Image (tube, rainbow, N blue to C red):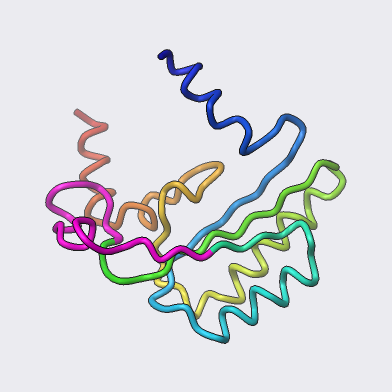
């Protein structure tokens, strides 16, 4: 199938007219303090959703983070995704701030890493790929 057809398969995730802001991070563990901060943020702002994922293990964890691929997040950890969804452009600032404020409030619990799939705009490559892998990507781009 063409790229356009493959891309269209995922359009149900972001219907036309809806606006989104997403930020992510990686936690070394999911604590009560982190859960309570997420619950408070969601209660305060219903546009906000928070998702936790414990997805590392098996072959992912057994592979050297820097030898085989650009995916460095291979130790036991919890992925965190924070997203606002809204339709009115007048709510842009509030919706973006809801995500950013939660992200900032959890900074002490975050490793500084982030899965590349958690970005809806520009990717922070060092967070997504790690410093060594970012340098490798830069070298490949130069080639």
**Occupied quadrant, residue 47:** bottom right
Q: Is residue 32 above or below residue 14?
A: below
Which residue does the image show at 31% across and 63% down from the upper left? 56
Is 139 in front, or is 98? Answer: 98
Q: How many marks?
A: 0
Q: Residue 104 in the image: x percent, y percent?
A: 60, 71
Q: Is residue 96 magenta-colored? A: no
Say whether residue 75 is left or right of residue 51: left
In the rendered image, which quarter contains the C terminus? top left
Specify the principal SS of the magenta part.
loop
Q: Residue 16 in the image: x percent, y percent?
A: 72, 29
Q: Is residue 124 above or below residue 121?
A: below
Is 138 in front, or is 11? Answer: 11
**Occupied quadrant, residue 101:** bottom right
Q: Furthest-top residue in view? A: 2
Q: Furthest-bottom residue in view? A: 32
Which residue does the image show at 30% across and 57% down from the upper left? 130
Q: Residue 72 in the image: x percent, y percent?
A: 26, 57
Say whether residue 5 is left or right of residue 44: left
Is 77 in front, or is 1? Answer: 1
In the rendered image, which quarter contains the N terminus? top left
Q: Residue 30 in the image: x percent, y percent?
A: 47, 78
Magenta residue span: 52-73
Say whether residue 130 is left or right of residue 104: left
Which residue does the image show at 20% across and 46% down from the upper left? 69
Say whether residue 35 is left or right of residue 27: right
Which residue does the image show at 72% across and 63% down from the upper left? 98
């Amino acid at each position: 199938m063409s790229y356009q057809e493959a891309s269209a398969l995922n359009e149900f995730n972001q219907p036309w007219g809806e606006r989104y802001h997403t930020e992510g991070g990686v936690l070394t563990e999911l604590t009560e303090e982190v859960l309570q901060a997420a619950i408070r943020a969601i209660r305060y702002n219903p546009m906000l959703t928070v998702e936790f994922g414990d997805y590392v293990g098996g072959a992912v964890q057994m592979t050297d983070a820097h030898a085989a691929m650009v995916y460095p997040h291979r130790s036991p950890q919890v992925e965190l995704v924070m997203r606002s969804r809204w339709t009115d452009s007048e709510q842009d600032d509030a919706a973006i701030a809801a995500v950013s404020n939660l992200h900032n409030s959890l900074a002490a619990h975050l490793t500084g890493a982030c899965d590349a799939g958690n970005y809806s705009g520009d990717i922070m490559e060092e967070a997504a790929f790690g410093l060594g892998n970012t340098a490798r990507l830069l070298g490949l781009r130069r080639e």
